[in-house]
Amino acid sequence: MGHGWEGVVLKLMRGKDFVFTVTGAQDVTAHCRRVHFTDGGMLAATGAHPTMWVRVWFPDAGRPHQRAYTLVDPDPAAGTFALEFALHEGPASRWASAAKPGDTVAATVQGSAFALPEPAPGRMFLIGDRASAPAINSLLTAAPEVPATVWLETQHDSDRQLPLRIRPARHQVHRLPRQDGGAHLAARVRADLPALLGDPATAYVWIACDTATTRTLAQFVRRDLAVPRSQVHAQGYWRP
C-alpha cells in the first residue's frame, strides 16, 4: 500500500520509512491496547529520546491513513518498543484490536525531536491526557529525581487505571475527568499552578492535550506566570 500525497510530502521532508512487526499485545484498560513490536532497524538508525513519536500507516478502505504515536519503552539494543492505542471507531483502533504476532505495519519517522532542559529543572509540571500519557511516562522515566506534578485528563472511568510511572515521594498526580471541552482541566491548572511554580526560571512546564486546551494553557504559563519560552513545551496532540 502506498502512502499517498502525505507520504510524498514526508519523503520530501526526509522522513525515514520502516516496517514494524508485531510480537504481542495486551489491553491496558478497557479503552487502551498496547501492541509490542520489533522496530525493523529504526532505533539503530534514529536513536531514542523522551516523547519520541512515529507516524504509523493503516489501511482504510484501500487508502492510506496515518496517525502519530509515542513510543513506549523503546530499547535500541533490542530493537523493540510498544505503542498504545485508544480503542474507539477508526482504522488505527480496528487494526490494533486485531493485531497478532507476525503482523506488520509501515511507519515513517519525521519531525520527532526533544530534549529536556540543561541544567535539569528544579521541578516539572506535566499536563496531558490519555493520548499523551506515554509521553508523560517517558519524561518521568528520563528525569526520575526531578519532583513533578502531573495533571492527567481522563475521558473514561477506565482511564483512571492508566499506569503512570510515579514515585510517590517525588511525584503528585491529579486525574481529572474531561468536562466542557477541556475547560475543567484548564481551570484546575490555572488554580493550582501559581502556588506550586516557585521560580519560573527553574520550572519546566510540558503541555500536550487537545489543541485548544494546549494553546490556552501555554498562553497562561508564558504570559501570566512568566515562565521562559525555553522552559515550556506545548504541543496539541489532537483536535476534538
Image: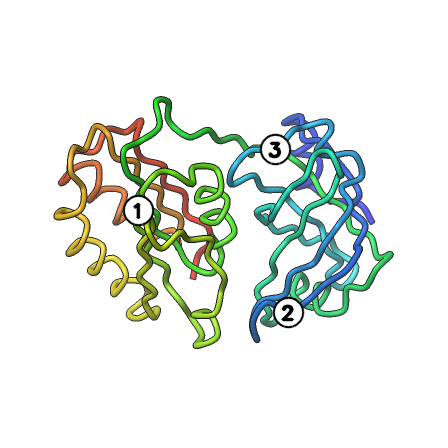
Image point (31%, 43%), residue name: 147
* Residue 190 on image: x %, y %: 18, 53
Which residue bears the numbered disc 1? 215
Q: Secondary structure at mark 1?
A: helix
Q: Secondary structure at mark 3?
A: loop
Give the residue at the far top of this rendering.
119
Please say if 150 is above or below 121.
below
* Residue 79 on image: x %, y %: 75, 38
Name the amino acid type tagged 3.
Ala
Q: Earlier in the sequence, mark 2 or mark 3?
A: 2
Name the amino acid type tagged 2.
Asp
Query: Which is nearer the eye, 234 or 58?
Result: 234
Image point (77%, 60%), residue name: 24
How far separated are the C-alphas under marks 2 and 3?
Answer: 25 Å
Which residue bears the numbered disc 2? 27
Relative to 8, 166 lies left or right: left
Classify 10 Å Cα crowding around label 2: few (below 14), some (14-19), many (20 and above): some
Q: For the C terminus, give its image quadrant.
A: bottom left
Classify 10 Å Cα crowding around label 3: few (below 14), some (14-19), many (20 and above): some
Which residue bears the numbered disc 3? 48
Query: Which is nearer the eye, 85 or 28?
Result: 28
Query: Which is nearer the eye, 122 or 32?
Result: 122
